[in-house]
């Protein structure tokens, strides 16, 4: 899914050595109150303490170790194990940079909660609504790319419930005519689908886009077609977004795929 938003990419976490597992379904997306915060589950390991940034350094053994067996579709900031650098050491900062800098969703301006369990992190990203309330746009799923304390965090998908991207399947090989679809709960929704090269530069080019598909109802199916212009073998991020009530983007879901080429 080049990246396509998930629940969307709901599935079951698995260990190294399994080819293209899909991120598992997680918390529901909706409105929550209170202040952003971080929750580290007991016994789940320590989160990275460095700050994510835009500079790249040399690859380190710790960052690369085990990356060859990475069982997910890498989405951002790295497109492959060979690209991994030890500079995205904080999952919350990495998740927010992915949303704002890579996807371009600047209406989403905060992390709400961050839960780290072993090599996995799930970060709620969202925006202010009314009073002290906040809206959750998505739960970004990240996995350490490699092993060791300097292994960077890699976005691998999203955990979604009320807005999902189930087609194409997570890790699928796609052609120039991509069918995207899933389910949505909402009123007067307008779905935009974009396809971007995985691990591309911040604000990188759009390889395909379709806007906008009217949608709504209770767990209602949605479906559209996007024409892609990319390099054969390239990893892609497919993202579906909706909004327009309070913010331009209020919910999104992503998934990862690989481009085969034209039919």
Image (cartoon, rainbow, N blue to C red):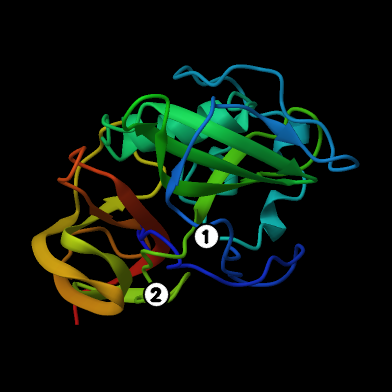
Kindly indicate whether the residue at mark 1 contacts the one at mark 2 (C-beta within 8 angstroms). Answer: no
Asked if residue 5 can be seen in this view, the reply is yes
Depicted 173 relative to depicted 230: above or below:
below
Quick one: SS at disc 1? loop
Q: Residues within 10 Å of mark 2 (few under 14, many from 20)?
A: many
Residue at left offset 31%, top offset 75%: 218
Residue under pointer 2: 166
The quarter of the rendered structure image containing the N terminus is bottom left
Where is residue 217 drawn, in percent x and y?
24, 73
94 horizontally vs 173: left or right:
right
157 horizontally vs 100: left or right:
right
Depicted 81 relative to depicted 153: above or below:
below
Residue at left offset 36%, top offset 25%: 131
Which of disc 1 and disc 2 is earlier in sequence? 1
Give the camera-side residue of 138 and 75. 138
Residue 73 is labelled as 1
Residue at left offset 70%, top offset 72%: 18
The quarter of the rendered structure image containing the C terminus is bottom left
Where is residue 220 drawn, in percent x and y?
28, 78
* Separation of residues labelled 2 and 1 (CA atoms): 15 Å
């Amino acid at each position: 899914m080049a990246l396509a938003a998930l629940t969307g990419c709901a599935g079951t976490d698995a260990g190294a050595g399994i080819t293209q597992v899909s991120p598992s379904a997680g918390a529901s997306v909706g409105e929550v109150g209170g202040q952003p915060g971080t929750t580290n589950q007991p016994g789940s390991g320590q989160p990275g303490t460095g700050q994510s940034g835009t500079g790249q350094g040399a690859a380190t053994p710790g960052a690369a170790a085990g990356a060859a067996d990475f069982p997910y579709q890498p989405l951002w900031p790295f497109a492959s194990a060979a690209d991994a650098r030890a500079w995205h050491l904080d999952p919350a900062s990495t998740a927010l940079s992915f949303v704002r800098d890579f996807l371009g969703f600047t209406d989403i301006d905060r992390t709400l909660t961050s839960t780290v369990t072993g090599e996995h992190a799930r970060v709620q990203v969202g925006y202010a609504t009314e009073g002290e309330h906040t809206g959750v746009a998505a739960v970004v799923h990240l996995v350490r790319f490699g092993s060791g304390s300097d292994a960077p965090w890699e976005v691998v998908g999203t955990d979604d419930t009320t807005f999902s991207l189930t087609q194409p399947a997570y890790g699928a090989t796609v052609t120039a005519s991509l069918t995207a679809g899933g389910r949505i709960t909402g009123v007067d929704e307008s779905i935009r689908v974009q396809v971007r090269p995985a691990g591309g530069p911040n604000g990188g080019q759009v390889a395909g886009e379709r806007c906008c598909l009217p949608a709504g109802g209770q767990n209602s199916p949605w479906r559209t077609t996007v024409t892609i212009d990319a390099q054969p073998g390239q990893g892609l991020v497919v993202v579906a977004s909706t909004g327009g009530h309070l913010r331009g983007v209020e919910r999104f879901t992503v998934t990862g795929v690989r481009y085969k080429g034209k039919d």
